[in-house]
Amino acid sequence: MAFCTNCGAPNQDAAQFCTTCGARLSGVPAAPGQPPTPVGPSLTPPTITPQPAVSYGVPGPPLPPGATYAVWADRVVGYLIDSLLVGAGMAVLYLIVGGFFAMLAGAGSSAASGMCCMMIILFPLASLLVGVYNRVYLVAQRGSSIGQGVMKLKVVDGNGNLLTMGTAAIRLLAQVALSFVPVVGPLLDLLWPLWDEKRQTLHDKAVGSYVLKMP
């Protein structure tokens, strides 16, 4: 009885190859012209599958045909248009409220003097109300504020969809929060698209939004 040195299986003494693993048994000469069969286990080097390169950047949204990331100049012009419209709306609101207070004062109402303090908080209140309509409602409904619509800009999320009302509101609040840092906050937010790969502002990055230039 002979035992295979490769797998250890028993074989007949006259056997030349192992009946279990097929290896040539020890002590049996190889046939002329035939390479000897290795007795030990065959060591096959493992196959190394190359792994795809890892991208650490955040992928942008799918771009519609002909669309690109909005350039800085277009965004600035859209912002200026929005600012002019906001200023015009606030001027009308001031005239209405001022006329109401003047009417109360002319009527001799003692409450008119106390209500004049409301003018102090009218500016931020009006700014918020106009911003909610122009930069939250309109952006969520059609993808652009009034100024952005003039410049053919569209605000989308990472999947290319319109922002929800909640996301658009957080985006506006992030922009307002940056304005509390005097000069540096608004300026840094405004200039950030100049060196950003996907031309995002800081308030865009806060919610993962992108501004596209539509064809």
Image (cartoon, helix red, strand yellow):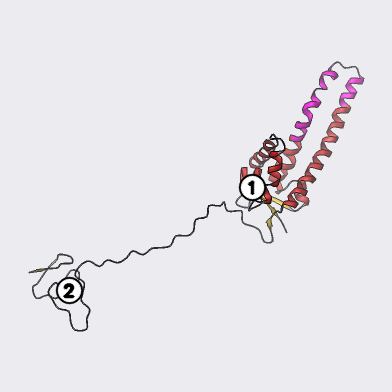
Disc 2: CA contacts within 10 A as few (<14), some (14-19) or many (>=20): many
Q: Which of 107 and 205 is in front in this view?
A: 205
* Residue 121 magenta: yes
196 in relation to 35, above or below: above
Of the image marks 2 and 1, the number of the one nearer the N terminus:
2
The part of the image, by quadrant, that contains residue 117 is top right
> What label does residue 209 carry, if any?
1
99 in relation to 154, above or below: above
| Magenta stretch secondary structure, dominant | helix
Q: CA separation, marks 2 and 1? A: 69 Å
Q: Position of residue 30 (x, y in %)?
A: 17, 79
Amino acid at dot 2: Arg
> What label does residue 24 carry, if any?
2
Q: Where is residue 141 in the image (x, y as percent from the top left)?
A: 70, 46
The range drawn in magenta is 100-127
Q: Residue at x 88, y 21 (%)?
A: 104
Residue sticking out furthest to the bottom: 32
Amino acid at dot 1: Ser
Q: Position of residue 24 (x, y in %)?
A: 17, 73
**In the visual, does 25 lie left or right of 185?**
left
Q: Where is residue 148 in the image (x, y as percent from the top left)?
A: 75, 49
Disc 2, SS: loop
